[in-house]
Every structure is written in structure tokens, then in C-alpha cells.
Amino acid sequence: MANGLTYQRTTTTPEATKQLAATLAPYLHAGDTIVLTGDLGAGKTQFVQGVAAALGVRAAVTSPTFNILLEYHDGRLPLYHYDLYRLDERWQLEDIDYYSAIDGDGDGAAFVEWAEKFPEDMPYDYLEIAITADGDGARRIVAHSFGSRSRQLLCVWANDSKSRLGKCQL
Ligand code: ADP
Ligand code: MG
């Protein structure tokens, strides 16, 4: 998208990925959608764990690969964590309330792993977090905004995270 912003960082430990994710949490609003991309084991679920902890979720955040959707309602904002890896058919998205979670009017923040399996059902406005393994334990984390709300979210997050965590490329 022409007006999209990109923000990139590299982490070298799972804890650093969670810390980076935690800096996003204060800026999340109801209706925000975050799409996480990257191979199996890239660190998508680790990222969501960092967000969840910073939202005040006390329950253990595990991978929703088998459940498809795990919800957490005890944090500052409801958190909907989808993993579409095991879904094969578009119609199954209805059953898990996917469309209402990603249409921008939801009551919480939706984090989605493997959304790209369903290109026709991508959210209208979303922040993409692309995680790539880059050698031993290193992960390149590239955030890109698709749409005006996610652009605003990325701006405030990147500025805050930049000042707290050191240099970045905006
Ligand atoms: P995904 O959800 O992308 O399939 P997970 O988050 O479940 O992946 O797992 C990521 C794995 O990679 C974990 O075992 C984690 O300990 C490991 N890891 C190693 N280095 C990092 C890093 N820098 N950031 C995130 N995870 C890392
Ligand atoms: Mg995962």
C-alpha cells in the first residue's frame, strides 16, 4: 500500500521479542488487527505472549494451532489470538467469528497467525508483523501498516519503542 509505513528491528532472544511486543500493547485499541507472518517457529506466538503479558493477561498464552482461536479476557483489552494454520476452508472462518474480529469494530485486539492462507479474507486495515529467522536466535521483525488506523498505530508504537529500546529505522 502506497502510504504504508515500515518499522524494522532485530531481536536476538525470545525475551527481546516479547519485550518489543510489550511496547506495542499500550497503543492497541478495540478493533485493531495484527497479522503475524513467518515460518513455523519464527516467533509469532512469542510476540503475542509479549503483548498479552503487557496487557495484563495472567493466563498462560499458548499456541492456538490446535484450538484455532484462543481468547483472553482478563487484560486491559480482550485479546483474540487466531492461528489459521490448520484451517482449510474459507467457510470455517465464519464458525470462529473471524470476520467480526477483523472488521475493525471488534471489542478487542485480534492477532492472527497464517492469515495469508486466506488472501480473499485479509482484514481491511491491519498491521503486519513479519518475522524472519536470521541466524542463531536472531529474528528480523518488520512491521508494515496496511490502512490508516494501522499507520497511526505503527507511528505511535515505533516512536515509543525507538525511545525506549534504542535506534531504529523508520
Ligand atoms: P511461531 O508461532 O512463529 O510458529 P513460536 O513463537 O511458537 O513460533 O516459537 C518460536 C521459537 O523460536 C521459540 O522456541 C523461541 O524460544 C525460539 N526463538 C529463538 N530466538 C528467538 C527470538 N529472537 N525471538 C522469538 N523466538 C525466538
Ligand atoms: Mg504460533
Image: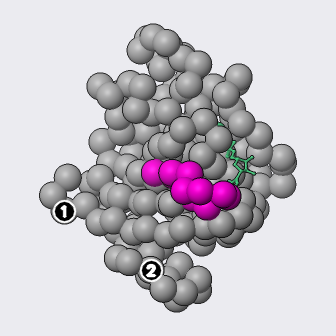
Please provide percent x and percent y for residue 153: 41, 66
Q: Which quarter shows the C terminus?
A: bottom left
5 on left or right of 126: left
User: Residue flagged by tag 1: what amino acid is it?
Assistant: Asn
The residue segment tinted magenta is 130-139
The residue most toward the front is 135
Indicate whether 129 appears above or below 117. Answer: below
Indicate whether 88 appears above or below 126. Answer: above
Residue drawn at (30%, 42%), measured in percent from left and top? Answer: 124
Q: Quadrant of residue 148?
A: bottom left
119 on left or right of 47: left
Please provide percent x and percent y for residue 126: 37, 49
> Which secondary structure, mark 1?
loop
116 or 141, nearer to the observer? 141
80 or 11, nearer to the observer? 11
72 or 130, nearer to the observer? 130
Is 132 within the magenta? yes
Residue where numbered disc 1 is placed: 3
Q: Which mark is residue 168?
A: 2
Residue drawn at (40%, 54%), measured in percent from left and top? Answer: 127
* Mark 2: few/some/many CA within 10 Å (<14, 14-19, 20+): some
